[in-house]
Image (spheres, helix red, strand yellow):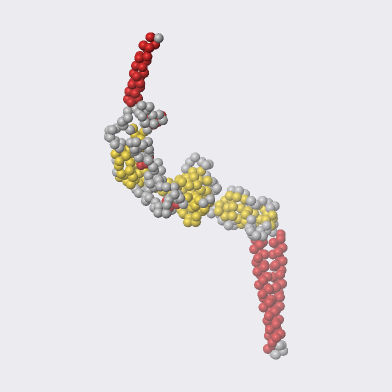
Amino acid sequence: MRRRKRRWPWILLLLIVGGAGGWWYYTRENPADAAPEYETVKIGRGDLTKFVSAAGELNPLVKVEIGSQISGTISKLNVDFNSVVKEGDILCELDPATYEANYAQTRAERSSAEAERDLQRRSLERKKQLISKQLLSVADFDKVESDLRRAEAQLELMEARLKKAKVDLERCRILSPIDGVVVDRTAEIGQTIAASFSAPKLFMLAADLTKMQINAKVSEADIGQIHEKQKVKFEVDAYPDSFFGEVVQVRNSPIAEESVVNYDVIIAVNNPDMKLKPGMTAIVQIITGERSAVLRVPNGALRFRPASKNGPVTAGGPPSGGPSGGGGGGPAPGAQGPGFKPKQATDEKQLYLKPASPKDELVALKVKIGLSDGVQTEILSGLNEGDEVVLLQKPKKDEVSGTTNPFSGRR
């Protein structure tokens, strides 16, 4: 029993020494007044390209749907898919038997009306001689004149019907209205066409596939940046290469789809090797600004705000929108009050330079910014090449691990 009583002071002494050693080691590794560490980047020069992304469909410059204005059965088919045609070439023919018979009948009726008119003319000449000798009453003479006018009107009617019958007969041959390529065909030999209400589509012709266009849908938020003659870079799934074009038209007609408003932007594309096909989906980048060999800074440096002494590490909110292209940090849509005024865009931002000594405070600096591609921003003034700016403040070890000093008294 005495030996056990003698061991207790030694055990208590070891516990005190161990606790003191642990406290010393912890405070050495995690000093309360340790200087914060920062991740920085040196300012350099490079190129910047700002663009608006959109999707669109490749189409021929001129696309013509060809149908039949008369009903009938297709008896001949002269072209197929991808056939090259000239203006006036016969694409297909309808069975002309019915229209030939109608034309012959109408022509005979016209000849009959012409003979009747000639008869009435000779009759009028005879009646004129009789009335000059007072051998015919005025009423009978007026009737002969009326019969002549009726015969002439009937002849004009027959001539119009004959012309219509001739046009219908000529329409049995479906002709190409342009020089181009057949990109679609629905006509088949033996197919019966009923054109009572509308002309059924038989062929689709593209004028010239070496010159095409993209109909790109650009959102209303970006349409203000789009202008004619801007350069365009685009890709299609069929090829790994990039293609280029130029904006030729910005249409003012809105396209509303599920409460989203877009505008049609027409992009001219050269296709000399015929790689691009009508209907392909193009992922478009419309270049709205370019800069070469300019001072640029990562956008994270413009968003960085140093942490408060008693608060957690923070990178701050995003800078307000401006030429840099950064998003606004204002309240969500619908949260503004009736007196809310949106913050005006500015081309001046604040960032922080790395302090000369770890114990020193960060150096706040106002800079004037220019173009931004969403990742980096052009610096117009306020910085020099080689300056070191702060991107973020590194968290302390206990903040990273989620633990706290048990001896600090903080929870």
- Relative to 110, is 209 on the left or the right? left
Q: Position of residue 10 (x, y in %)?
A: 35, 14
| Image quadrant in which the C terminus is located | top left
Give 124 or 309, whichever is nearer the viewer.
Answer: 309
Residue in the foreground of this view, choosing between 157 and 58:
58
Name above or below for residue 1 compared with residue 62.
above
Residue at 68 percent across and 84 percent down: it is: 142
Furthest toward the front, the residue is 1
Task: Residue at 66% x, 72% y: name it.
Answer: 156
Q: Farthest residue toward the top?
A: 2
Tell whether 378 sits left or right of 101: left
Q: Position of residue 50 (x, y in %)?
A: 41, 45
Residue 126 picture location, percent across and down: 70, 84
Position of 278 with respect to 135 (left or right) is left
Q: Position of residue 183 (x, y in %)?
A: 58, 49
359 w.r.t. 217: above or below: above
Image vertical order of residue 260 relative to residue 40, above or below = below
Residue under the point 68% across and 89% down: 132
The residue at 60%/50% (across/down) is 184
Query: Count the marks: how many?
Result: 0
The quarter of the picture where the N terminus appears is top left
239 horizontally vs 104: left or right: left
| Residue 373 visible (yes or no) | no
- Does residue 187 appear in this view? yes
Pick the front one: 300 or 182? 300
User: Which quadrant of the view contains residue 306?
Assistant: top left
